[in-house]
Each structure stands twice: as structure tokens, then as C-alpha cells.
Amino acid sequence: MNYSVKDYMDITPEIAQAVAEGKPVVALESTILSHGMPYPQNLEFAREIETIIRAEGAVPATMAVINGRMKAGLTEDELQFLCENKNDCVGKLSRRDLPIALATGATGATTVTTTMMLAQYAGVKFFATGGIGGVHRGASTSFDISADLQELAHTPVAVVCAGAKMILDIGLTLEYLETMGVPVVGMGTENFPSFYCRESGFGVDYKADTPADVAKLAKVKWDLGMGGGILIGNPVPEQYAMDFGEMSAVVDKALAAADEAGVRGKKITPFLLAKIVELTGGDSLATNIQLAYNNARCAARIAVEYARL
Ligand code: PSU
Ligand code: MN
């Protein structure tokens, strides 16, 4: 029997209809919930970010794999299950894990990589997250480069993020994106943001002044048949931004703790995220939540403009 993607995926009627009618839809990832934020703040966040997207006139599409089925749009119970992540029962699924999860009936959260994949399968072109994965510090010996960068190279989804965390080598991450032909856009800025902070010291390829500018860029890129993604760096709102020097010191401590604990591979990013929340006494969590809301608003506005083109 010839199976195709649709035999492995459930898309809610609301999302399927919006896609079919060319209406704005924004994909959301689930690893940010299960492995990026503590419970129960993540559950409240998961609900609120969907509300923000709806308020802009777009349909939210939170992605995950539940019992071996790809899902675009989750039920309240499914969200609860992913956010609780009891005894670490929720997997963190990257590209290589996706076919294994479907073949074995597993449940897991999608990273930026797999959220882009599910978005493409569902026909969704815009995606909001917090921070992307990238080239880790010390990658010249660890070879740790997030699969997110390869996905941005190949999968035609525009990703709005607040930049990359300082747990990464931001300069090398941007070099990698250049090599892979991924346009890096600054939303109202010439400086690629660094997640908790509005600047990283590294420039972007194009400063977009409005969501309509980004929508136009996306249309041109995909009209040309170039495929691949676009990365939009949207700085955290001023009132929630954290001090660059303070956060650099916190990140250094978190990296040292990871080193000491011998954490490597797919576990390192969740380890560092949790450590940073712990070291900042929860301050970083509030910033993380607000910057993701801000990205959801931005992605929804881009999707709305794109639907008008
Ligand atoms: N960076 C963050 N917050 C996150 C992640 C990264 O600031 O929640 C998550 C995303 O799901 C991202 C993944 O796709 O971690 C990257 O993991 P890795 O570094 O193992 O590729
Ligand atoms: Mn990695």
C-alpha cells in the first residue's frame, strides 16, 4: 500500500480549512513547553500564546506527536500531558527521531526542526518560537550544531524568534545560516537579537520595518522556487529585556554546570534552559514568556499580510 504524509497526520478541521482557504495560520512548537519551561507556567503560556495569535486574526497550530500520530492542533488534554511531562515521558523529537516516533507509536514534542516539518506537511508557512538552536560554543570539537539550521536551509517556513541564546556561538550560527542560504531578517533592527537581550553585536542581512516587508520577502523567495526558510529576529520588548553582562555571566555558569555534569547531545539545550531559570530565580522565565508572546504577535501579523498578497 502506498502511504503518504496524510496517513500519519491529524490536522484539526479549523487548521485544515484555514490552510485550504489561504487564511493566516501560525505554527507553534511543543519542545518549548515540555523541555523549555517549567510546569505549570508552560501550560498557561501554551494557552495564552494561542489566544494572542487569534487576537491578530490568525489560527494557531501547535505541533506535536501523540501516540505515533503527527498532530497540527492539540486538545486540552494533549497540551496538559506535554506540559506536565511526568517522569520525562515526553520525547524531544528532532528530524531523525520523527520516523522512529511514528513507527513505534511514541509521544513527543517537536523542536524548531520538526515543527517546521509538520508545518510544511500541513501547509503552514509561518511559525513563532522563542529561540532557535544553533552552533554551540565549542562546536569545533563537539560537532554540536542544531538540526534547526539544516531545516531552515531546506524547509520553506518563516520562523520568528527572539534571536539565539548566548548558550550558542551566535557569530558561528549566523555564518552557518549564510552558508546554507538562509536570509536573516531583523524586525525593526539591524542587530540580530540574543534572546534575553535586544542585541548580540552581530548584524542581520535585512532590516524589515513592517510585517508586510517580511511577507513580501517570503513571497519573492518562494515564488523563485528557492525553497528553504527565512529567519526573523524579533527583539524582546524593551521593558522585559535583561542586562547583557548579567546574562553572559549566568550563561557561563550554566555552561560550566553542564560541563561538570557531563551533559551532551540533545540533553544539553534543555539542561541549560532549566539551569538559567534556576540561576536567575525565575526572572529569565518571565522574559522568555514575554518574548515568545511578542514573536507570536509578529508571526501572526506577517501571516495576515502574506494572506493579502
Ligand atoms: N532554544 C531556546 N529555547 C528552546 C529551544 C532552544 O532558547 O526551547 C528548543 C527548541 O525546540 C529548539 C531546540 O528547536 O531546543 C534545539 O535543541 P538542540 O539544541 O538539541 O538542537
Ligand atoms: Mn545538539
Image: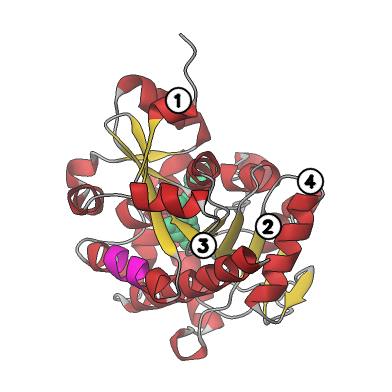
Q: Counting residues from the N terminus, which is met first, the one under dot 1 or under dot 4?
A: 1
Select label 3 or label 2 by which is in front: 3
Judged from this view, the residue extending furthest toward the top is 1
- The colour scheme applied to this rendered structure is secondary structure
Could you tell me how far apart the alpha carbons at marks 2 and 1 are, in whole angstroms? 25 Å
Quick one: label 1, few (<14), some, or many (20+) residues within 10 Å? few
Name the amino acid, label 2.
Ile
- Secondary element at image label 1: helix
Residue 226 is marked as 4
Q: Which range is magenta?
A: 45-51
Residues under numbered marks 1 and 4 in contact, where contact means CB atoms less than 8 Å apart? no
Residue at image position (55%, 81%) is 244
- Using the numbered discs, state the Cα–Cα distance from disc 4 to disc 2 in whole angstroms: 11 Å
Magenta span: helix, strand or loop, mainly?
helix
Q: Which mark is residue 99?
A: 1
Compared across the picture, whether 77 is left or right of 102 comes to left
Q: Earlier in the sequence, mark 3 or mark 2?
A: 3
Q: Secondary structure under badge 2? A: strand
Which mark is nearer the camera, 4 or 2? Answer: 4
Q: Which label number is shown at residue 230?
A: 2
Counting from the top left corner in percent of width and height, residue 295 is at: 50, 71
Type of amino acid at the residue the image marks with label 4: Met
Mark 3 residue type: Pro
Q: Earlier in the sequence, mark 3 or mark 4?
A: 3
- Camera-nearest label, 3 or 4: 3
Identify which residue is drawn at 62% across, 43% down: 151
Return the x and y of residue 233 as percentages of the image width and height: 62, 69
| Location of residue 181 with respect to 217 vertically, above or below | above
Decide if residue 26 is on the left or right side of residue 140.
left
**In the rendered structure, are the residues bearing label 3 and label 4 in contact, judged by CB atoms less than 8 Å apart?**
no
- Residue 24 is marked as 3
